[in-house]
């Protein structure tokens, strides 16, 4: 059997059988589940290794059948301050669920680690990183909003909101009273957010502050267009309200 060394982010840990757990990890080129035997035991040497919101270096044993097996490793960084705020923790678990719809890459790995680090440090850019992860899901899944005009009539003036069901900008006439009116600044911010290149995303986060409401908006967009109910999102919305 082959052993492999990995640098990984621990996304989730789910109990399995009596003292084992199935751990979801993200690397720079894949997302996978591994079996961590005995880590729910207080005596386990690997107990602290598999905590969500950790950056770890681990060695696993790949098997022909079933999950790869955790052998050993060490914690490189534990973003434990995330756990001190229920809303931050809940949002980060939503992000963990989002990884299902992402193709892993260096950029995705960087965004997750940067987001955790920002929440850990109580940095205002944390919501911006969360929105960037949601943006990557929207792009990779081919559900980018229509921004070239009103998605219903095509006009390019008097744009007033974004219709989730309609799929893009709506003008005043086509919107009616279906969706809340968004400010011009918000519409421009959302447009710039999707049009800006990856190379300039960091500059955007320095200049523009995003909020949890921005993240929840894009999560509503993802949930509707992928027709996928995120239980973690329902909980986040309930405590945010």
Image (cartoon, rainbow, N blue to C red):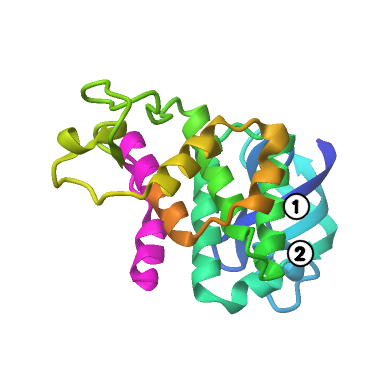
Q: Which residue is mark 2?
A: 49
Q: What residue appears at the point 27 percent right and 23 percent down from the top-left corner? A: 155
Residue 238 on the magenta span: yes
Whether residue 35 is visible, yes or no, is no
Which x, y percent locates residue 74? Answer: 85, 61
In which quarter of the view is residue 127 placed? bottom right
| Magenta span of residues | 220-241
Instruction: State the predominant SS element of the stretch in magenta.
Output: helix
Q: Which residue is mark 1?
A: 70
Q: Is residue 7 left or right of residue 163?
A: right
Dot 2 crowding, Cα within 10 Å, few <14, some 14–19, many 20+: many
Query: Taking 146 as reference, is 193 above or below it?
Result: below
Q: Residue furthest top?
A: 154
Question: Which quadrant, please, contains the N terminus?
Answer: top right
Q: Answer yes or no: do the residues labelled 1 and 2 have beta carbons within 8 Å?
A: yes
Query: Taking 157 as reference, is 118 above or below it?
Result: below
């Amino acid at each position: 059997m082959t052993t492999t060394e990995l640098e990984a982010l621990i996304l989730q840990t789910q109990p399995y059988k009596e003292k084992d757990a199935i751990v979801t990890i993200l690397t720079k080129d894949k997302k996978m589940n591994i079996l961590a035997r005995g880590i729910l035991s207080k005596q386990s040497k690997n107990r602290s290794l598999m905590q969500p919101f950790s950056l770890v270096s681990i060695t696993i044993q790949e098997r022909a059948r079933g999950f790869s097996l955790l052998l050993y490793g060490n914690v490189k960084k534990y973003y434990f301050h995330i756990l001190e705020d229920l809303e931050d923790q809940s949002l980060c678990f939503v992000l963990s669920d989002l990884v299902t719809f992402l193709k892993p890459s260096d950029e995705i790995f960087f965004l997750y680690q940067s987001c955790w680090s920002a929440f850990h440090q109580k940095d205002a850019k944390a919501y911006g990183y969360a929105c960037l992860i949601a943006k990557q899901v929207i792009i990779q899944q081919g559900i980018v909003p229509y921004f070239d005009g009103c998605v219903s009539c095509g006009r390019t003036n008097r744009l007033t909101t974004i219709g989730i069901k309609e799929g893009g900008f709506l003008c005043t006439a086509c919107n009616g009273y279906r969706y809340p009116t968004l400010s011009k600044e918000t519409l421009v911010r959302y447009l710039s957010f999707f049009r800006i290149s990856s190379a300039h995303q960091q500059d955007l986060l320095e200049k523009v502050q995003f909020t949890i409401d921005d993240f929840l908006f894009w999560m509503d967009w993802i949930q509707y267009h992928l027709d996928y109910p995120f239980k973690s999102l329902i909980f986040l919305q309930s405590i945010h309200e």
